Image (spheres, coloured by chain):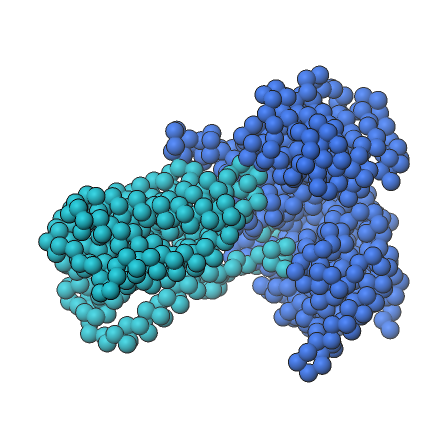
Chain colours: A cyan, B blue
Amino acid sequence: MEAAKTPTPKKEHVLSLGERISVIRQSRYFLMVFPFAMLAIIILIFTVATGGQFFRMSVFSSLFSQAVIIGTCATGVSFIYSNGNLDISIGSVLGLAATLGVMVFTATNNVVLMIAVMILSALALMAFNCTMSVVCHIKTITVAIVVTQIYGAISTLLIGGTGTIDIDYNVAVSLEDGGFRYVSFALYFIFCIVLYHFTRVGRELRFLGGNENCAQQTGISNSRATYISFLVTGLGVGLAAVYSVTNVAAVSVETGSNLGMDVMLATVLGGMSIFGGARSNAYAGILGALTVAALNTGLLMVGVSSAWIQGIRGIIFLILVWMNSERLALLPSRVQF
Amino acid sequence: MAHKGETLVEVRDLCKYFGVTVALHHVDFVVKTGEIRGLIGENGSGKSTVSSIIAGMQPASMGEMFYKGKPWKPSTMLEAQAAGIGMIVQESGTIANISVAENIFLGNYGKFKKGPLINKAAMVAEARKALEKIGVTNINPALPAGHYDMQERKLIEIAKCVYNDPELLIVDETTTALSQGGRDIIYRIMHEMADNNKAVMIISHDLNEMMEQCDTLTVLRDGVIIDNIEKKDFDPDDIKQKMVGREIKGDYYRSDNDGYGDEVVLKADCITTMHSLLCFDLELHKQEILGIGGLSDCGMHTLGRALYGLEEIVDGDVILTKSGTRIKNAQVAFRSGMGYVSKNRDTESLELNASIFANIASTGYDKNNAGPFILPWKEKTYVEKQIQALQIKCQNAYQPVRALSGGNKQKVVFGKWCADDADVLILDCPTRGVDIGVKAAMYQLIYDMKKQGKSIIMISEELPELMGMCDRLLILRDGAVSGEFFRKDGYDDRELIEHMI
């Protein structure tokens, strides 16, 4: 579709509304701007609807608290999604890393050691997942399903009878309210953005996700890129384990459950496909997580019942997926037919 | 039965827009019974668009169509098929994982249904009949289509189309994927149809073929019909000029006899692959354009892949002689300054959903950087330079590659390797499915690369381009060199063909 020159126009072609919308939607900026615009619109609507109550620091800090665990994981996992892999085991990785960290803390009472153990064990577990898939050529999703069971079982064994291990409440509060959460998240997020968008890592992952054959012919190593993606995710999951534990001052057998699905949801809401490829980015996860948090909080504040919140969230989710999933109108090609 | 010369399909004032892009601009034409109509024009001139609208693949934006005198507005390909319009599409139109028979009757399973079950045996038997009808007996309809190569899969599609006895057969750039034998099958079917007062529309970039086979040629340029030419008025230079809107000389190959250096840059030392090659030797010299030709299954495509480390080499080595690097996989090849243009453009040479920018930039991650960081402005120059030099027709660099026409896609592939500045380039069918304008540009580019001191291996199924471009030409038969020809000595195509078969 390149025949742009029209030598002798007989009639002027007027764009219909549908065509205008499709031109806007196919703009390369659309997908970049759209999720930000959605979040801004949601905040604006709720600010008006609540007479300004919504636009307050305390609300924003609560939004951040709700979004940070899912957002951190999703930021990392977007690296994995980018090259077409799926990993739903991060919930159980987070659970096991948190358990190990809490056990070390109980034994040593050393906060720094606890954080280090959580991050390192998350890194090690993700590296193990990756090795299984790269070396043994098992699909990442298959590995994830198996290890989810194993890691879950180990956590349950370690935590033992009561199902929870508490940590000192004051330590938890100081970690949660002190600078650690904000600073560590900001550093991690910036690290991911730079790595993804300003080095070859993100470009390679996207390319592999789009066409692995082609990427390999341009000298891109799939194993190397896959390892990087899993390790970046491991770092994020380790941090999220710290946030999870300090949030409730305990680790339980439930820690991290459902996280894999929530992360996928956030990624899609943030405007990225979980199947990776050309339109992937590293900020969709946190945007999506913030959007969900803003919707939940805002709807609660204007007095919508929780049953309705589910429904409204579902509708918005469908609209977003529809907006993100259109096929271009094309000439017939081998891809289409 | 229809009489010769009656109007079968009429297209009036047809327009097609993709957003703001105009693909067809008020096109009118008539296809008559007993006629073989050729559509010819540069890539993106609207040939495929107009035929796909007639065949029900996509709707027009404006205008009317008439088929057998009645208004014609098919909403699906199946509707068009049922009404007697069949189309053989450009590139692969078969599904690899299902059987040949299922491919042939795709969407038409009804007649084999027994309650909820499908009588596979009957379907296979009927598919065999369909294949025999076009004279193909070496394809087993019970096997999955993926079992067969491109050429055989094309024949399956042809069988599928012809089985329904279409009144109008549309052949969209199919012949370029076929060897002479396959082409002859298509030509026979086309002429039989014309003799029976049916009609054929054919799209091809092979001007000689079009002039030989067609009764009338319709020349399209930028979505507008430039001319309709009757057989008696066919003149290659006139047609070319009408296609591209400027004069193109009859000969666009290189005319020099410059020769090449003595230094061997790439060497295959008795390489054996799982298929095709057994202890194969090859030497590529500096500044040499080495042509490799033969029938499509002679092993030349495997050779190209093996040299770039894409095919498993069971025994022997591919070595870059200067550095002594052994090419054991594509990463090593790429890092050592080699480049490879695959025969399968859409599946291997491009990331279709990514932009032109991302595709071209993909060879430059090690060039447009400062330490680990990629410098966006450097990357931008890297890409823009190629888009301008190759005159890639696009709205902007951020358009997805899949929205481009075949020739422009191929330009993007060339763009990324030109930008890469590889020293050794392996080109497998570099001009497949591109029009003469783009072809001429690519030959010039290949020649320029030679001038810059690069070494090129050009694998092709088209003898004229091998003869026109190569310093040295190897003809392969059954995985071994059956003949070696030197530009300086001169040779003709008969000698080549003798060594091929």
> Residue B42 at what x, y percent from top left?
67, 46
Give the residue at x 28% y 72%.
A309
Does the image show residue A238?
Answer: yes
Farthest top residue in view? B262
Residue A63 at least partly seen:
no
Query: In the shown orientation, is residue B428 left or right of residue B494?
Result: left
Residue positioned 76% across, 54% down in the render: B152
The answer to which quarter of the image holds residue B291 is: top right
Q: Which picture quadrant has residue B96?
A: bottom right
Where is residue B449 drawn, in percent x and y?
A: 63, 26
**Which residue occupies 71% across, 81% down?**
B114
User: Height in image: B256 above or below A150?
Assistant: above
Q: Quadrant of the N terminus of chain B?
A: bottom right
Residue B439 shown left or right of residue B483 in the figure: left
Depth check: give the residue in front, B94 or B297.
B297
- Measured as percent of width and height from the top left, residue B393 is found at 57, 43
Tell me the residue at 58%/21% (across/down).
B323
Residue A21 occupies which quadrant of the picture?
bottom left
Residue B499 in the figure: left or right of residue A301: right
Query: In the rendered view of the protein, which quadrant contains the C terminus of chain B?
Result: top right
